[in-house]
């Protein structure tokens, strides 16, 4: 039986096909590149968007400002948990994580090293469930940064909200750029559509279905989009396994033999050192989820603390399993392209003189080397990964700016209609800011956006980590004035200098994702210096 299987896949029977030998198998794959119709793909994208508009229209009926900000605290925890998968993973995970597996240019993690960060996430999510969630419900918060107002006063409150706005703006636009760039390169470039027009149209789509309903709508659209994203992942994985005539177990074995499955990094000087990634993953989860208005806005929109905690537990389990699938898919994609004739040359993986390493790998395989039906599923899944990270960010930034910076909820002179007018204006303004930031990322044109996203988090979320940590872990008070703002600006500046010079100053030691913790500790220390003892 084994011999028959081998003969079916042999090069003698299929002289125009290439083969990869692995253990008992000779795997054959088609060698001719295929290009899909850009018009066909665009038609499916348009149809998918019309479905989203239909969901938005249905869910935003009779929506109020409270619906927009926190969904009237009536969201279903199961829908929130499932939808948060799409928000957390986003297009960055969908494209970048598979690309890291065989990326020889990686300075952080390579092979399955990203799983070290995922293990760290688990510890961070448990801290959110047992420490932050009960605190937010106890204080009955609409914006989580009101905690800083109650604990330290207006200066800390405004500073925390501003750092969230900066952090989420850069993080969301980096994710948006990644997916929009894929759509541009593989679809709209052939239709002679400029990148800026593609970006503007995508942002307009997101505006249209979030303009009225906000969180109330996003809970449902994110659930739909997460379903499509996971469907795309599974379909691509199953098809490649079937095409290579191997089981999931065989795939793991092949990936291991190629050296792609290594998880543990014991080089303490490397950015990918296991202890750095475990600690970094934990504090990234706490900061980018627990101290992030976008993520917590959905969590505190459910009825009770227990439901919100169940949401976090479910979300954690699904997220770990999904990331394992993404890493496995990444290994298979690299094996697929190496079989097609791709070759490593220095820090590049070249196929027909084009570098396909990192973020370009998955789109190249799906749209050029797989059947049209799989390519369509990939595009729908990619867009489904794009929208949850963008619509939630746009809604959360609008909520934070209106509530925390403009204070429309605390202004008794503003009625419901006036508040809505301000909210819509802010919503549109942030869409324009998104457009400008995406164009900046286009100019930078980095090959691995996930590294940019997590590096930026180290600088922008550090002050939030320090502020909340100081409030929760101490009973000290901060003096009035904007000394707290100065501390929160100085800490990232010191971290930047430290990051640039660490290898020189510390005998080759590179600072990885522990930068977020260092930033938070510097902020904590600075706040201690300008604080006083608690007064009764």
Image (cartoon, rainbow, N blue to C red):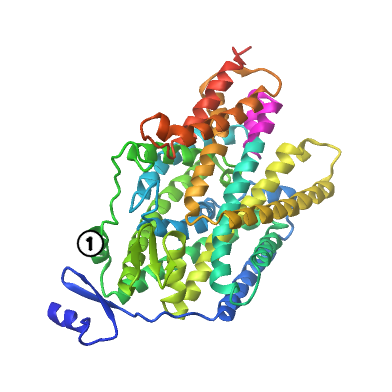
Q: Determine whether, in the image, residue 130 is placed left or right of residue 39.
A: left
Q: Picture quarter containing residue 124?
A: top left
> Is residue 58 rendered to the left or right of residue 454?
right
As rendered, which of 217 and 108 lies closer to the eye? 108
* Residue 329 drawn at (x, y percent): 36, 63
Say if the magenta span includes residue 155.
yes
Q: Farthest residue toward the right?
A: 413
Question: Which quarter shows the N terminus?
Answer: bottom left
Task: Tell me what residue is drawn at x 67 percent, y 46 percent.
Answer: 397
Image location of residue 442, percent across then percent down: 59, 58
Q: How many marks?
A: 1
Quarter placement of the C terminus: top right
Q: Quadrant of residue 54?
A: bottom right
Q: Which residues are magenta?
A: 143-160
Does any portion of residue 521 appear in the rendered image?
yes
In the displayed structure image, the side of residue 104 where residue 364 appears, left or right: right
Q: Which residue position holds label 1?
A: 253
Can you say whether 158 is above or below 259 in the image?
Answer: above
Residue occupying the point 26% across, 56% down: 259
Dominant secondary structure (helix, strand or loop) of the stretch shown in magenta: helix
């Amino acid at each position: 039986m084994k011999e028959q299987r081998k003969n079916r896949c042999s090069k003698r029977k299929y002289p125009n096909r290439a083969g990869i030998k692995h253990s008992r198998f000779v795997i054959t794959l088609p060698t001719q590149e295929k290009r899909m119709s850009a018009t066909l793909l665009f038609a499916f994208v348009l149809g998918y968007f019309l479905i989203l508009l239909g969901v938005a229209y249905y869910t935003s009926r009779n929506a109020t400002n409270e619906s927009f900000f926190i969904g009237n605290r009536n969201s279903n925890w199961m829908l929130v948990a499932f939808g948060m998968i799409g928000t957390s993973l986003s297009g960055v995970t969908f494209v970048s994580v598979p690309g890291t597996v065989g990326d020889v240019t990686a300075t952080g993690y390579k092979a399955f090293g990203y799983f070290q960060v995922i293990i760290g996430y688990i510890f961070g999510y448990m801290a959110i469930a047992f420490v932050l969630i009960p605190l937010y419900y106890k204080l009955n918060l609409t914006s989580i940064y009101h905690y800083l107002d109650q604990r330290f006063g207006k200066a800390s409150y405004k500073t925390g909200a501003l750092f969230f706005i900066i952090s989420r703006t850069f993080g969301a636009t980096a994710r948006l750029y990644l997916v929009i760039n894929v759509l541009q390169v593989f679809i709209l470039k052939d239709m002679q559509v400029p990148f800026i027009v593609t970006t503007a149209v995508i942002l307009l789509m997101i505006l249209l279905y979030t303009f009225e309903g906000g969180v109330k709508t996003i809970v449902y659209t994110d659930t739909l989009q997460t379903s499509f994203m996971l469907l795309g992942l599974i379909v691509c994985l199953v098809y490649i396994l079937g095409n290579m005539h191997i089981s999931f177990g065989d795939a793991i074995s092949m990936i291991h033999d190629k050296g792609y499955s290594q998880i543990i990094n014991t080089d303490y000087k490397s950015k990918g050192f296991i202890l750095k990634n475990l600690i970094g993953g934990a504090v990234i989860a706490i900061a980018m989820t627990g101290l992030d208005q976008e993520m917590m806005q959905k969590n505190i929109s459910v009825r009770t603390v227990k439901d919100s905690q169940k949401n976090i537990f479910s979300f954690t389990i699904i997220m770990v399993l999904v990331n394992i699938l993404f890493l496995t898919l990444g290994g298979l994609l690299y094996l697929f392209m190496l079989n097609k004739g791709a070759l490593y040359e220095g820090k590049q993986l070249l196929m027909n003189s084009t570098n396909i390493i990192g973020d370009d790998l998955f789109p190249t395989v799906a749209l050029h080397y797989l059947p049209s039906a799989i390519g369509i599923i990939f595009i729908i899944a990619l867009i489904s990964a794009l929208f949850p990270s963008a619509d939630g960010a746009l809604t959360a930034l609008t909520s934070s700016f209106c509530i925390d910076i403009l204070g429309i909820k605390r202004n008794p002179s503003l009625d419901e209609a006036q508040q809505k007018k301000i909210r819509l204006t802010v919503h549109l303004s942030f869409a324009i800011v998104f457009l400008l930031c995406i164009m900046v990322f286009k100019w930078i044109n980095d090959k691995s956006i996930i590294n940019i996203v997590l590096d930026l988090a180290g600088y922008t979320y550090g002050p939030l980590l320090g502020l909340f940590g100081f409030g929760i872990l101490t009973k000290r008070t901060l003096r009035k004035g904007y000394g707290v703002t100065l501390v929160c600006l100085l800490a990232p500046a010191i971290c930047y200098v430290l990051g640039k010079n660490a290898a020189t100053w510390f005998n080759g030691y590179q600072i990885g994702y522990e930068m977020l913790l260092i930033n938070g500790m510097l902020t904590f220390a600075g706040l201690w210096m300008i604080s006083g003892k608690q007064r009764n």
